[in-house]
Amino acid sequence: MSGVCLKYLAYFGPGVPVADLKLYPGLNVICGASETGKSFITESIDFMFGQENPVRNIKEQAGYDRVRLLIESEGWPPLTLDRSIEGGNYRAYEEAVFEAKPESPEKVLRWKHSAARQDTLSYELLQRTGLEGKILRKNKRSETRSLSFRDLARLCIVNEEEIQRRSSPLLSGQFTTGTVEYAAFKLLLTGTDDSALVSEQKVITRNESASGKIELLDQMIEELQSDLDEQGLEEGELRTQLIRLGNSLEEQRRALENVQKELDEILQSRGQAAAELRDRKARLAEIDELVARFALLDEHYGTDLLRLEAIHESGSLFVHLDRKSCPLCGAAPEHQHLDAECEGDAEAVVQAADAEISKTRRLRQELSDTVSSLKQEHHKINESLAEFQKGYDIYNKQLGEIAAPAVASERASYNELVSNKAEVKDWLEKFDRLHRMKAQRAELDDDDIPSDIKAETATRIPKSTLDEFSQVVERILEEWHFPNAARVFFDESKRDFQIAGKERGSMGKGLRAITHAAVSIGLMEFCREKGLPHPGFVVLDSPLLAYWKPEGEEDDLTGTDLDEMFFRYLLGLHKDNQVIIVENKHPPEFVVKEGHVTVFTKNPHQGRYGFFPVAS
């Protein structure tokens, strides 16, 4: 089995230190803390093997402008590839170049595969793999295209998102590429391509209207599928999530009603306390105003009493004095009529003043009693005011510190659930729309293909070959001590595996990751055993997910020896097979002694910080 071996990966840039990683035949393990560039390495390898889209931008990458990958193949000169971080074509040198500048002549390799060109990266790699010129079926009309190295890359470079997906390890999940992806798997498994196929396009006359509809549907399906794949969404998970969100919404609604009821009760109690405070303060203000008015009235009474007492005193003196001419009418004493009523009757004036004095004193006393009563009421209200204020403050504190925040929190949670449910329904609507478009697409295809050739349009792999490959996967899982690994069976209808009667896609993401790894490793092993072409390397990101991020008890492998057996098996592979494992969890000590382990510590004072050097 020919293939390629990765030797060196590096990032370069003006004025920044080289960020590099040396790789070796056999087992390579890259492990350590999160956010240190481990998954970035997987993405960078994929990028350097022809991925069109640039690697995601991370802050540590600032200042770097190109990537270098050195590969070696038995019987071929070394190949050093340089590529801009923005993508595009490659500068290639047929020598092993690490940090130094290349000395050999430069040649340009195009990043995009073309069957008509040999100056492409794909052709260079397919030559080294022994698969150049191979043909793959691309649809059920038996139309074909040439094999690209990208068709093989997804089978041997598996990132963290792909390794835990529910869909088949052999397929990307995109409707428009499913046929060619399965054909690539068939090519590796059997060594036979699809060059013998004769395109039905040559014998089928398709009217332009149907062709236009199919082309438009293919474009719409591809765009929608790409959108869904980019989000990493699974329809089954979304429908389960929608049910859970519905249940959570009902529970949250009841919780919101309870805290709202509590809030309303506190608001009502605080309102009553506020009304009592308001009424009492209003009464205090009213009493203060009355007391002020009564004080003014008392002053008037005082003034009246002084005036009346003056009249009384002056009248009394006048009565006891010698008789003189009347001060009022001027009549002489002998002409005064003392027994007749007149304005000059001083005695009558004194008596009237006395009566008025008595009346005024009585009114003043009543006023004093009233003011005294009002002041007593004012004192009592003032004393009780503190108690009512305390009650109001308690309710206000409960409202501000407990009830209102609880309602706000519950309402925010409720609104978030409503938003999440709407988002899930929106994505499910996209899945439904995708299914409808696929059905329309299939209907157009069926209407356009004669009935006598419809049965011959599917890619077929001999059942004996599929069974033999399933046994390889089963053997690997058993050697890894995978729980209940008996009876591995390939389900052609779903193009995925069943393990002990259970569909692989229905397992937890941790078990899906380790079984995906078994399929990728098994495919490389199967090709070597049969002497069939294979890229010769496998890159797996987070295959032991079940140890550090399980999805429930059934998905949790903590406490088992699967990780130990996993690494022992990989160490025992043929020396020409290269396996690169990217993991959070450190491998057992024997792996450090027998394999090649790189640890990222995320500690600038201990070991290697991460893929990129620590900025000074």
Image (cartoon, helix red, strand yellow):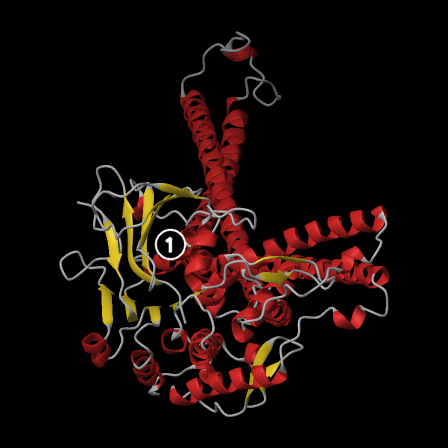
Instruction: Answer above or below: position of 324 versus 46.
Output: above
- Report the residue that reaches farthest toward the front: 75
Report the front residue among 195 and 354.
195
Q: Quadrant of the C terminus?
A: top left
Looking at the rendered structure, the number of numbered marks drawn on it comes to: 1
Residue located at (78% from left, 73% from top): 455
Residue 469, percent across and down? Answer: 52, 82
> According to the image, label 1 marks what residue?
44
Quarter of the N terminus within the rendering: bottom left
Q: Amino acid at mark 1?
A: Ser
Give the image quarter of residue 236. Answer: bottom right
Q: Residue at x 29, y 69 (%)?
A: 25
Left-right relation of 275 to 477: right
Q: Is residue 267 visible?
A: no
Question: SS at mark 1?
Answer: helix
Judged left or right of residue 33, residue 300 is right
Percent coordinates x, y for residue 127 in the rendering: 44, 58
Q: Nearer the viewer, residue 14 or 358?
A: 14
Q: Is residue 287 visible?
A: yes
The quarter of the displayed image where residue 33 is located: bottom left
Q: Position of residue 217 (x, y in %)?
A: 74, 52
The residue nearer to you, when weighing 342 against 180, is: 180
Residue 155 percent coordinates (x, y):
48, 67
- Most extreme residue toward the left, as rendered? 605
Q: Is residue 344 left or right of residue 441?
A: left
Q: Determine crowd level at label 1: few under 14, some 14-19, many 20+ residues with C-alpha closer than 10 A.
A: many
Position of 493 with respect to 481 (left or right) is right
